[in-house]
Amino acid sequence: MAGAALLGGCSVTVDGKPVGSPHAAAPSHPTRGPAPPPAPTAPSPPPGAIPLQPDKNGYVFIETKSGQTRCQIAVDNVGCEAPFTNSPIEDGVHANGVNITADGTVQWVLGNLGAIPTVTIDYRRYDAQGWTIDATAEGTRFTNDRTGHGMFVSLDKVDTY
């Protein structure tokens, strides 16, 4: 009964038709909710970085100038294969691969990238699939442009951040 009384008190009906002026302006209040925020944009490549184009599957394959390290670069991760001197033991042998995701998760693996179509990089800065690659004689640094996570890869050590 109390619910019916509350509803009855909130209802008003007025007979007639709404009439507008031909010169009436649109309402000054928004008729919809606020516009959605703009979609996040991909970070732009660092100045001076040489762009490396992905294949049709979204991968960039590189080989370091020394020829000792090969890597597969995708939007979400970078995986490198090399004869590492201090890698952890996986299934009784030293791991020959390391993978890092854009969120900083690292995994050591055993495997072989196979006959990938690599591009040999020089000691320069490159951009591939949202990763900045800084190649030097000491090793190669991969940094995800969006998250800042990455890894430094050399035969003697792999540092992740």
Image: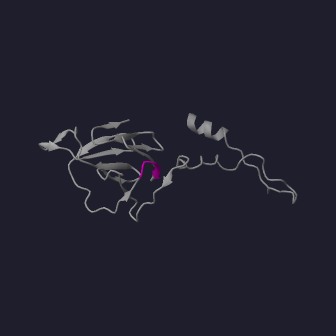
Quarter containing the N terminus: top right
Q: Position of residue 13 (x, y in %)?
A: 72, 48
Above/below status of 24 relative to 103: below
Magenta highlight range: 122-127
What is the image's colouring?
one colour
Give left or right: position of 126 versus 39: left
Near-viewer residue (127 or 107) = 127
Q: Position of residue 154 (x, y in %)?
A: 31, 42
Residue 88: within the magenta? no
Query: In the displayed image of the protein, which residue is found farthest to the top?
Result: 2
Query: In the displayed image of the protein, which residue is found farthest to the bottom?
Result: 56
Can residue 130 be seen in this snapshot?
Answer: no
Choose top left, top right, bottom left or bottom right for residue 8. Answer: top right
Q: Position of residue 116 (x, y in %)?
A: 30, 61
Near-viewer residue (34 or 4) = 34
Residue 126: within the magenta? yes
Q: Please give the name of the residue rendered at 47% of the width and 51% of the height, measured from the top-left corner.
A: 127
Near-viewer residue (122 or 77) = 122
Near-viewer residue (42 or 158) = 158
Q: Position of residue 93 (x, y in %)?
A: 14, 44
Q: Please give the name of the residue rendered at 27% of the width and 38% of the height, measured from the top-left corner.
A: 156
Query: In the displayed image of the protein, which residue is found farthest to the left?
Result: 92
Choose top left, top right, bottom left or bottom right for residue 112. Answer: bottom left
